[in-house]
Image (cartoon, grey):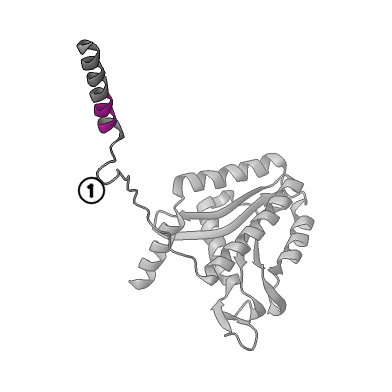
Amino acid sequence: MMIDVLLYIILIFFAFFVCFVFCRPQSRNKSPTVTHQTIIPKKPLSEQETFGKRGEQQVSLMLKKVAESCGGHVFNDYTFADQQGFSTNIDHLLICKGGLFVIETKANKGLIYGNDNDDYWRAEKEPWQEDKEFKNPVRQNQGHINHLRRMMGGKAPKIISMVIFSAASSLAHVNSSCTYSLRSAYEYLISKANEEKYSPQTVERFRRILFIIQEEHGISIEEHNAIVRDRFSS
C-alpha cells in the first residue's frame, strides 16, 4: 500500500516537472531572432523620366510589330563607348531589308515648334503649364548616327534618321522631314521596311555587326550618364 502511494506521488511530481519545463512562458526579455536585409531604395523617377520611359516602351512595341512583319531586328537602349571614351545612347535601332533606322524618342507634350537648323525646339503646353525648351532632337540623333557609322566603319548600311514624338498633341509647327508621331512613324516604317534594299542574309550580317559592337563596347545607361557628366563638367 505504501509503495502504491509513493509511486502515485512520484508520478504527480513528474507530471508537474514536465509541465514546468515545457509549458512555461518564454521570458519577455528574450527577443525573437530577426534576419535583417539591407534594402537600397530606388530613386523615384521624375514625371519627365516616367513619360520618357512610357514613350520608349510604346515605340519599342511598335518597332517589334514592324520587325515581325518584315523579318527585321530591333535593338532598344543601344548604348556603347568608343576607344576615345565618347559614349552614345540610341533609343532604338531597327535593321531590316529597308535599311538601318536610328530612332530618337521624345515624350514632350503639347504643340511642338522647331526646324532642322534651330539649336533648341519648344513644347508649348496648356496655358496653366510652363512651356519647355529642349535641344534639337534631329541634331541629337544625327550625332548618334555619326558615332554609330564610325563604329561600323565601311560596313554601315543605309541609315535613316527618325525622331518620334510619342505624346505630342501636334507636330504641325515642326519643319523637319524626319519627325513623326507614333502613328505616322508606324505607317512610314511599314512602307519602308519591306523595300528590297538588302537581302535577308545581308540584314543578318548587319544585325551581327550591331550585336558585336554591343557585346564588345556596350556600357550601361548609368555609365553613359557618368561619361556625359564628366565631359561637360570639365
Relative to 52, residue 223 above or below: above
- Quadrant of residue 180 within the rendered picture: bottom right
Residue 100 spot, x, y in % from top left: 65, 54
Residue 184 spot, x, y in % from top left: 76, 66
Depth check: give the residue in front, 230 or 17: 17
Residue at horizontal 40%, vertical 59%?
Answer: 41
Look at the image and tell me in which quarter the C terminus lies.
bottom left
Residue at horizontal 50%, vertical 55%?
Answer: 79
Going by the numbered disc 1, the residue's amino acid type is Asn
Residue 82 spot, x, y in % from top left: 43, 55
Q: Main secondary structure of the magenta part?
A: helix
How many numbered circles does the render carry? 1
Residue 146 visible in rendering = yes
Look at the image and tell me in which quarter the N terminus lies.
top left
Residue 152 lies in the magenta-colored region: no
Depth check: give the residue in front, 33 or 181: 33
Q: Which residues are magenta?
A: 15-20
Residue 17 lies in the magenta-colored region: yes
User: On the picture, is 44 further left or further right than 76?
Assistant: left
Residue indicated by mark 1: 29
Residue 141 visible in rendering = no
User: On the picture, is 69 further left or further right than 162?
Assistant: right
User: On the picture, is 84 further left or further right than 193?
Assistant: left
Q: Residues within 10 Å of mark 1 (few under 14, many from 20)?
A: few
Relative to 68, residue 125 above or below: below
Relative to 54, residue 116 above or below: below
- Quadrant of residue 229 within the rendered picture: bottom left
Residue 91 spot, x, y in % from top left: 57, 59
Secondary structure type for disc 1: loop
Residue at horizontal 62%, vertical 64%?
Answer: 55
